[in-house]
Image: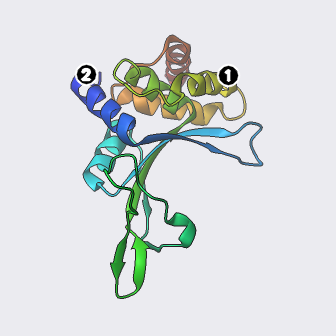
Amino acid sequence: MISPIKLGWMAGVIDLKGRLLRKRNKMRATPQIVLAVQTKELAVIRELGNLTGTKPEAIQKQPIKDFMRRSCAEHCPEAHVHYYSDVDGLYMPEMRRWTVTGAAMYVVLDNLLPYIQIDRGYTEAMEKVMGNTSLVGQGATAVIVSLRRLYSLGWELPDEFKGVVDDATAGQA
């Protein structure tokens, strides 16, 4: 079981940096809902990856374009742009992005909801994911693999998913 301290820490990170993204893939019937955290704080991303058994992606340093110059007014007293400069000009720093999708996102949010303070539409996203998740047939294997990974790391599975993981495990015995 993931400790309440770890769940509280992760919920705080999600409150501060978590965003729901919707990816449109022509191979999918519905948009893929993604819970993402992007930051240059490697230790935070590494711990999120350790807790969920995922590998965060690296986003390389990139030149800043005019459309990227949005002013920060969320956490700074005066609006300004977060960027860096060097001999090559202005650039966005190297970042890391942790993501979790589908049934795995549902499990993570289901465990974190009691600790989350800022609602960014997580409950609605979870309902859509649950309605679109295949537990049998095409795509079910990937769902079961992600659920088993989270379960082995100590995440509590909702009853709808626990039975599927138990059945898959029994079928391998």
Q: Residue at x 53, y 18 (%)?
A: 161
| Relative depth, front residue between 73 and 19 | 73
Residue furthest bottom as drawn: 87
Residue at left 41%, top 83%?
89
Q: Please state which amino acid type lies under the numbered disc 2.
A: Pro
Q: Horizontal and vertical percent for residue 173?
A: 49, 22
Residue 164 shown left or right of residue 113 in the figure:
right
Left or right placement of residue 30 versus residue 54 in this view = right
Pointer 2 local density, CA inside 10 Å: few below 14, some 14–19, many at least 20? few
Instruction: List x then y, in percent, for residue 48.
Output: 34, 42
Mark 1 lies on a secondary structure that is helix
Q: Which residue is mark 2?
A: 4
Instruction: Identify which residue is drawn at 51% across, 21% down.
Output: 165
Horizontal arrangement in the rendering, residue 17 relative to residue 144 (left or right): left
Disc on the earlier residue, 1 or 2: 2
Quadrant of the image containing the N terminus: top left
Find residue 7 and report its image quarter. top left
Furthest residue toward left: 5
Q: Say which of 110 and 153 sits in front.
A: 110
- Element marked by disc 2: helix
Quadrant of res 5: top left
Q: Are marks 1 and 2 in contact (CB under 8 Å)?
A: no
Going 52% across and 34% down the picture, which residue do you hit?
Answer: 145
Q: Amino acid at mark 1?
A: Gly
Query: What's the distance in space between the residues labelled 1 and 2, CA to CA?
Result: 28 Å
**Residue 80 at x, y percent in the picture:** 38, 61
Which residue occupies the foreground of this view, 163 or 92?
Answer: 92
Mark 1 highlights which residue?
A: 131
